[in-house]
Amino acid sequence: MFTALFTSFLVLMFVVGAPLAFAMLLSSVVALWYYATLPGVAPIPWVVTPQRMFIIVDSFPLMAVPYFILAGELMERGGISLRLVKFAVALVGRIRGGLSLAAVLASMIFAGVSGSGAADTAAIGSLTIPALIKKGYPRGYVAAFQAVAGALGPIFPPSIIMLIYSAIANQSPARMFLGGIVPGILIGLGLMIVSYIYAVRHGYGAEEAAGWRDVLKATLDASFALVSPVIILGGILLGVFTATEAGVVAVVYAFIIGTCVYKELSIAEMPAALVKAALTTSVVMFVVAASGIFGWLLAAARAPVVAAEFLTSLTNNPYLIFLIVIVFLLIVGGLMEEAASIIILVPVLHPLAMRFGINELHWAVILSMTLVVGAVTPPVASFLFIATAIAQTTLGDSSKHVWVFLAVMVGVILLAVVFPQLVLFLPKLLMG
């Protein structure tokens, strides 16, 4: 009865359109109230609610979230995204469909700066989407393409999604960062191949070939932007700073480059950037805090044990377990924002790795990547909404084109399931 009431009230909150954090928090409070009314049961003090909310956010890795959000905001305003696009065009523009290839390459590099798919989609898409439409590409295609390219943001380090996952599941954020690099590169290459085939089939040409002087100029102009992911990830791996401290380094670096080097970020813009970053951080952290009491009650209701028993009744094959969970997450991801999905599902799904003898890092990275796919899967599709707005088209139009790009992402995820070393190779090589 306890579990049924808990679940029913949560579903009711979603049906009436309550925000995720309030839905989790109110469902937890109602469940605690009901538990206290049961005969012969010692009531749980109400102080447990704020206590559990505080425990989940009292996490050193989570402190990195506001810093990386602010760093992404400063880098977008400071001209870094513009220089990355120019560099990418100079590098691959001479190939058929070169501008679309450049959009993917720029998104891959910017992903190593922001850690956010929304920031990646908005920053790079605001430059590449209008340019691709001017070249004659259909608006729906461009929106779908750039949304999936932007989804590389939470896969490459420093991924905010992986930071949240690592805090909830007590995993190493640095190892998760490294685990996402090879699959992220494979997804980027897959998107480039699809965009090249599309350009050839529809007769889209290349950009004007850049000479070596132009390539050198674009490289030098973007050098400060290009070196930022190296500083962030290199500092973590060399032990110079932690993943959390890397967020502070990213903010300071973005501020210096934007104000003193590129001189496109003015001091007058700082209050607006700080307010926007604070609002985004507040939403994320409140949802995480609400998940503290929510996850505790899920554990009390034996949700991980029930899920494990259900899957065990179906199969003990770890590959089939992976496949079942991936299909489930793809469905959930299309109905719920990816960070929210991780917060709700990680307490239930992560313990399954040990139950079925699956490497925890491999499991964590695959689950994170799969939930990112939901950000470009209708009907929720938060990244797709951003790209659609920039392209000035409809979600229905862009949805028609998104499936082939989603197939690339899912294909790489399944490849990483079959070949775990795609995820585990770099963490083992660089961190032992």
Image (cartoon, helix red, strand yellow):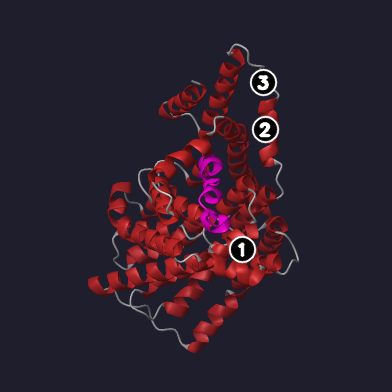
The quadrant where residue 11 appears: top left
Q: Which residue is mark 1?
A: 264
Mark 3, mark 1: which one is toward the viewer? 3
Callout 1–callout 2 Cβ contact below 8 Å: no
Callout 2–callout 3 Cβ contact below 8 Å: no
Residue type highlighted by circle 2: Arg
Q: CA distance from mark 2 to mark 3?
A: 12 Å
Identity of the residue drawn at 49% across and 52% down: 367
**Neighbourhood count class around disc 1 (C-alpha, 10 Å): few under 14, some 14–19, many 20 upward:** some
Residue type highlighted by circle 3: Ile
Q: CA distance from mark 1 to mark 2?
A: 43 Å
Q: Position of residue 144 (x, y in %)?
A: 35, 57
Identity of the residue drawn at 53% across and 59% down: 362
Q: Position of residue 425 (x, y in %)?
A: 56, 70
Identity of the residue drawn at 29% across and 47% down: 396
Any part of residue 376 in sight: yes
Q: Position of residue 217 (x, y in %)?
A: 55, 82
* Residue 52 image label: 2
Relative depth, front residue between 45 and 351 = 351
Q: Which residue is mark 3?
A: 44
- Sequence-first tag of 1 and 2: 2
Residue type highlighted by circle 1: Glu
Q: Is residue 161 above or below residue 284?
A: below
Residue found at the far bottom of this picture: 212
First to last magenta residue range? 342-364
Q: Describe residue 17's horizontal placement relative to residue 177 as left or right.
A: left
